[in-house]
Amino acid sequence: MSHELPSGSRGSSPTTATPAIDGAIATTGLPLRWLYAQSQLHLRPITSPITQPEHHSDHQAAHPADMHFTTVGSSELADPGEFLPPGSIVLTTGVGFKQRNQDFDAYVHRAADRGITAIGFGVGLEYPTVPQQLIAAARAYRIGLFLIPREIPFTRIIEAVAREHQRRAQLEQRMAAQIQEELNRTSHTSGIEGIVQVLSHRTHSAVAAAWGEQVVRSDSAEHSPAASARLDAALTHASPAHAGTVTAPPGAVLYEVPLGPTSADGVLLTARDHAFTPAERGVFKHAAGLISLVQRQHIAPHTIPSTRLAWEAVASHMVGLDGTSDRLTTALAPLTDADGRVRLLAFRSHSPAAAARAALRDRVVAAFERSGLEFIDLPAPREGAHLVFAAAVPDEVVSLLDATPTAVSAPTAVSGLSGDVLYSVVVAMRPAHRGQPLPEPPSLPAWTGNAAVRPVLHARFRETLQRIHDADPTLFDTAVAFLTTDGHVGDTAATLGIHRHTARARLQQIAALGCDLSVPETRAELLILARLFQPEG
């Protein structure tokens, strides 16, 4: 379980910080100057926290975060922030004032108390221009104010902001993936120290990994004094398992991720001056997993159970920490069949609730234990999914996972296990059918291994699936899921954990890129290509 803990009190204004640069993940929120720079909207700023005079009232203190906003909504209510979250921009035509200009001061005062960042005033309906009383109130309470011309509908502003949020969210996810790849590479060469330094540099935060009597922390030059003080307080005055409960200097946010299921395993701590985004929290969890794996590289085999050894060997091999298969072969030997092969079972609960996912996993584990088969299970690289390694899948498990997103690999030699194998099984998760065995991917045609044919197939892969991946990695995942579920939109949506409408919209985008997956011949061709090659970048 991870926690994000603010330090110090928050005012009525939002506390979003300026987006980080130099490859770090951007924070949530958009700057007002971005909105004003959208020439197609023809907005005219009148007052803003950037241009207001230095003196201000006690109602709302100046803060750099005042220049950012999170959402935009239109409202003609007397209390503009009643149904809008702090950090919003409210759009209004002033129709509710009915020329009672003296009410603007109380209106802006309420907006300031609600944490509204700026007011967009539409002219040409109730008012021909922005009232002077509104301008004076915006300056007094240090709220941004801008004029919206009569020809610009409010929906155009709202849609422009939504598109920019979506664009930045996609960029953030890609940057997070790049950081995770860098952390994977660093774990090979620089171990825990390298992971901590990369994490600190790429997220502009103070970072420390603490377990037992050991602490590895980032260089202080990479972050602010407030973040350093927050981290020091967590390390000095509390045990790692309860680092977030201490009283610390204001001005920084602490985020903690356990390095294992018990407090003895330690914790990864990160702190900086503003909140962490969901993508960044995902990066921290990934880093915590890598640190845990690196730690296990130095544990003598006789000090932990054989099942735990197998778990660590599989996890290390899948992320590339262990480049050889010797350790994996030794650890998984008790799990293989007579031919030295193992099956990979992937399954996921329909329910997003953590309790439901844990209950399903417990039932599957209990069924394997009753079968007498040796097995290990570990989280799969998809939210809420699990992966089980065993020589076979008992009938009780097949029945238990009926109508649950499930997939199983063909018997695979331990030496052939890789991240690609795991990825293909997880993507292929689909509802099993009652009374039928779990599906196995068919063997590829023999001609696909022909040395003369392979370059042609790879060129075709670059023209199709690689092009889709370059446009948007989520479209590639959707294409592969659609191909491996025999072209069923419902199963594709269940595999990816998205709505059917979202899956259909993505398939339309894929078709626009020149790959119409509704054509059976196209699906057959691309399914072979998807099993032969992995996208680059």
Image (spheres, rainbow, N blue to C red):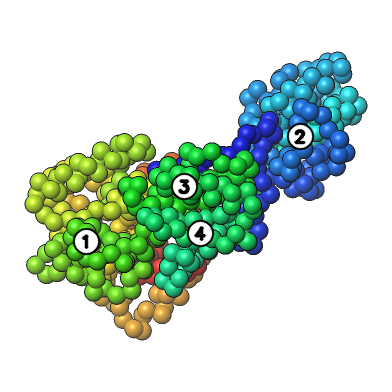
Q: Residues at badges 3 and 4 in contact (C-beta under 8 Å)?
A: no
Q: Which residue is mark 2?
A: 61
Of badges 2 and 4, nearer the viewer stands 4
Q: Which residue is labeled 4 in the image?
A: 217
**Mark-to-mark CA distance, 1 and 2:** 57 Å
Viewer-proximal residue, 454 or 245?
245
Q: Secondary structure at mark 4?
A: strand
Against 349, residue 184 (above or below) is below
Q: Nearer the viewer, mark 1 or mark 3?
A: 1
Q: Which amino acid type corresponds to the residue marked 1 in the rendered image?
A: Thr
* Quadrant occupied by the N terminus: top left
Specify the amino acid type for callout 4: Arg
Q: Earlier in the sequence, mark 1 or mark 2?
A: 2
What separation in Å lies between label 1 and label 3 (alpha carbons)? 27 Å
Q: Residue at x 20, y 52 (%)?
A: 438
Element assignment for label 1: helix
Is residue 511 visible to us here? no
In front of the other: 440 or 298: 298
Q: Could you tell me if the residues under marks 2 and 4 are in contact, i.e. CB atoms within 8 Å? A: no
**x%, y% of residue 496?**
39, 48
Q: Answer with left or right where residue 17 lies relative to residue 120.
A: left
Q: Earlier in the sequence, mark 4 or mark 1?
A: 4
Mark pair 3, 2: CA separation? 30 Å
Q: Are marks 1 and 3 in contact (CB under 8 Å)?
A: no
Residue 303, numbered label: 1
